[in-house]
Amino acid sequence: TLEGTPFPTDAAPGAQWDALPSAAKWQIVCFAAIFELWSEGAMKTHYMKGGKAGEFPSFKDSEVALPHPVPFDLFDPFGFSKKASAEKKAAGLVKEINNGRLAQIGIMG
């Protein structure tokens, strides 16, 4: 921590959260809130009203203007998969879903 006390590495997640300074907790909460507000406000059609679930709006190609330039998007920031075939994209989606499932299993134990 900023005060110089060592961070508890073998403590339960609740104790680790309690060990964080308040400023760090607010930074985490505000970061998540900004992305939540962006995903809700910059979508043309909300996923509950016919939009595509899981889609995150682009920072570069959005109709909503940001107060500063954002050079990259969250998904494919360098454009590596722009010209990928549908089969390659589908295989990548399966790999990503399986990776997420393994991460969820791994965090349990």
Image (tube, helix red, strand yellow):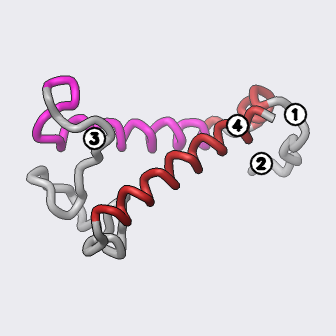
The residue identified by callout 2 is 1
The numbered mark, 4 or 3, whose residue comes first in the sequence reads: 3
In this rendering, the label closer to the viewer, 4 or 3: 4
Separation of disc 2 and disc 3 at Cα?
32 Å
In this rendering, the label closer to the viewer, 3 or 1: 3
Task: Tell whether 55 sits left or right of 5.
Answer: left
Q: Are marks 4 and 2 in contact (CB under 8 Å)?
A: no
Q: Percent x, y for residue 71?
A: 29, 71
The residue identified by callout 3 is 39
Dominant secondary-structure state across the stretch colored magenta? helix
Q: Residues within 10 Å of mark 4 (few under 14, many from 20)?
A: few
Q: Residues within 10 Å of mark 2 (few under 14, many from 20)?
A: few
Q: Percent x, y for residue 94?
A: 47, 51
Task: Tell whether 42 sits left or right of 109.
Answer: left
Numbered label attached to residue 11: 1
The numbered mark, 4 or 2, whose residue comes first in the sequence reads: 2
x 65%, y 44%: residue: 103
Foreground of the two, 21 or 96? 96
Hey, what amino acid is under mark 1? Ala
Hey, what amino acid is under mark 4? Ile
The residue identified by callout 4 is 105
The numbered mark, 3 or 1, whose residue comes first in the sequence reads: 1
Separation of disc 4 and disc 2 at Cα?
29 Å
Separation of disc 1 and disc 4 at Cα?
20 Å
Foreground of the two, 25 or 99? 99
Separation of disc 1 and disc 2 at Cα?
15 Å
Label 2 secondary element:
loop
Foreground of the two, 97 or 76? 97
Separation of disc 3 and disc 1 at Cα?
34 Å
Residue range of the region highlighted in magenta in the rendering: 23-49
Task: Tell whether 52 sits left or right of 15.
Answer: left
Q: Examine the rendered structure and indicate whether residue 12 appears above or below residue 87.
A: above
